[in-house]
Image (cartoon, rainbow, N blue to C red):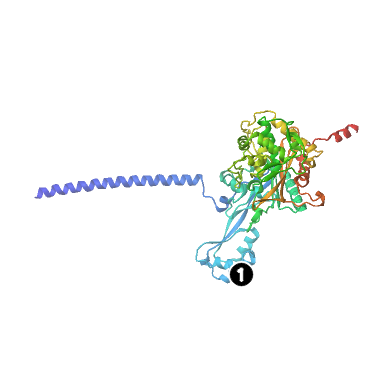
Amino acid sequence: MFHDFIFYGRDTITLVQNRLVWFIRASGFGMSILVLRLCWVSIAHRSKPQLSLEQSMERRVLLDSQGKILAHSLPSFALAANPKKIMNLKEAVRELHSILPFLSKKKLEQRLSSKKSFVWICRQLSPKMRLKILSLGIEGLELFKTQKRVYPYENLFSHVLGSVDTDQQGISGIEKGCNKIISDQERKKIPIYLSLDTRLQYVLRKEILSCIKAFQAQGGNGILANIHTGEILAMVSLPDFNSNVKQKDPGSNAMNRNTSGVYEFGSILKIHNLALFLEEKKGNLDSVFDATHPIAIGRFLVKDFKGKCRPLTVREGFLYSSNIVNGKMALEVGEKAQQSFFSKLSFFNPIKLELSEYAIPIIPKNWSKARSITAGYGYGFSVTPLHIVQSLQILLNNGKRVPLTLLRRHNKICESPSIFKSRELSKTLSEVMEMAVNTGQAQKVKTNYCKVGAKTGTANILINGRYREHQNLTSCVAVFPMPAPCYVLLITIDRPKGNASTHYYHTAGWIVAPVVRSIIEKISGFLGIIQLSDRTKNFNKAK
């Protein structure tokens, strides 16, 4: 019995020793992992220090193509409170309201009487306000360093730049669309150059605004872009807003008409219809179509505005903006070829810039023969102004698409393969558009500063399922300098009212064409494209 007991006791001791050894090993392994983890955290913490509230809110500076500041962050202060430490609530509310009158006493009382231990009082304070609050000596108040986004040009770039929220995060425009790269803390000292030019932007906005006021229009917009690089040099949408002021009820002011508005552009699309007709080799500029009688589409008639009532060549159909001729050209081409060509021009997909806002074109599901006729002169489907500019860039750049951008391009441009079969199509379109300025319906675009090609478009607006004759979207697109255009300019005025200066006409030739001419004359010097007219050359020779 005694020996059995000793044997049993030794076995128990051995088992306890083994368990103790394994416990020590496991503990050592766990401690090793913990030490390694602590070392890794300390190294990582040393290489990437914790960002302060001010640093985490700092955003990169946005510059125009000439280096002028469009948006930058300035040091600011934020006021918070611990309501539990506020001793005299009524006195604290009264004194804070005297310094921050834009905050109501009721709102201050609600925040300072909160059961929470931390509440924000105001997120944007000036240094002067900070000093006044510090002088109050109220226990429970705390001030933090933050950042405030400032837009020196206020309304000028409002739709393009957009704005930020109280946490300095982009909520619209390029501030939201490029929020990740703008808020990149590792590159915060490196500015971002946009393709926009402040001088050109100012001219566009001033001229469009003057036109809206003169003709009591609902709004207007404009885009100026480089055909070869795809860079947008100016983009204006009116009405606009001040990016420095928080919009409580932005309404229509917040919409960027260039990217978020879809419209039927009317006769502007006759450029595209002509390109399609020539590309499909259904005829040439001298081909003749009878424009004596309207085209019947069911119970509707396709008529010409002040038509010639005679056979017209394709060239004349473009110069006189004949709906009948363009409708018959579309019939010659056919629905499938028309859809395919429009698709290549990016009409059926949204065009996305570096902005957060974009619109999807309104394209009918049933592309019938009747739809093909109306599409030939710009009705039946709706696109954004950005689509018009992108398509003109393709048509006048030998069929090669360069994506539009709001960022200044530093690298080599990546062009897509040409969509054209003919190498002469872009040249032909340029020549015909120049004819429209010299002898056609775009004569009010003509200027002595440089040679221009243009096309006007007046489209009745669809309201409650019916086209209203006196509710027009008036547009004019111009390309310059000719004969090898480098820039495309689109201006649109929404529902203008004619006056005595236009003989009470409210069509694009009277309303928008003079605006386009004025803009080109004022920006040609900035672009370095002033061309002396023959009269000026002869005068200089005589001297």
Q: Is residue 396 left or right of residue 19?
A: right
Residue 297 picture location, percent across and down = 66, 43
Residue 101 picture location, percent across and down = 64, 65
Rendered position, 441 above or below 150: above
Element assignment for label 1? helix
As rendered, which of 453 and 52 lies closer to the eye? 453
Q: Is residue 200 visible?
A: yes
Q: Residues within 10 Å of mark 1 (few under 14, many from 20)?
A: some
Q: Identify the residue shown where x is 78% and y is 45%.
A: 514
Residue 193 picture location, percent across and down = 65, 42
Q: Is residue 146 left or right of residue 397?
A: left
Rendered position, 526 above or below 89: above
- Disc tally is 1
Rendered position, 92 above or below 415: below
Q: Is residue 481 visible?
A: no
Residue 427 picture location, percent across and down = 72, 31
Question: Residue type at mark 1?
Answer: Arg
Q: Which residue in the structure is indicated by mark 1? A: 94
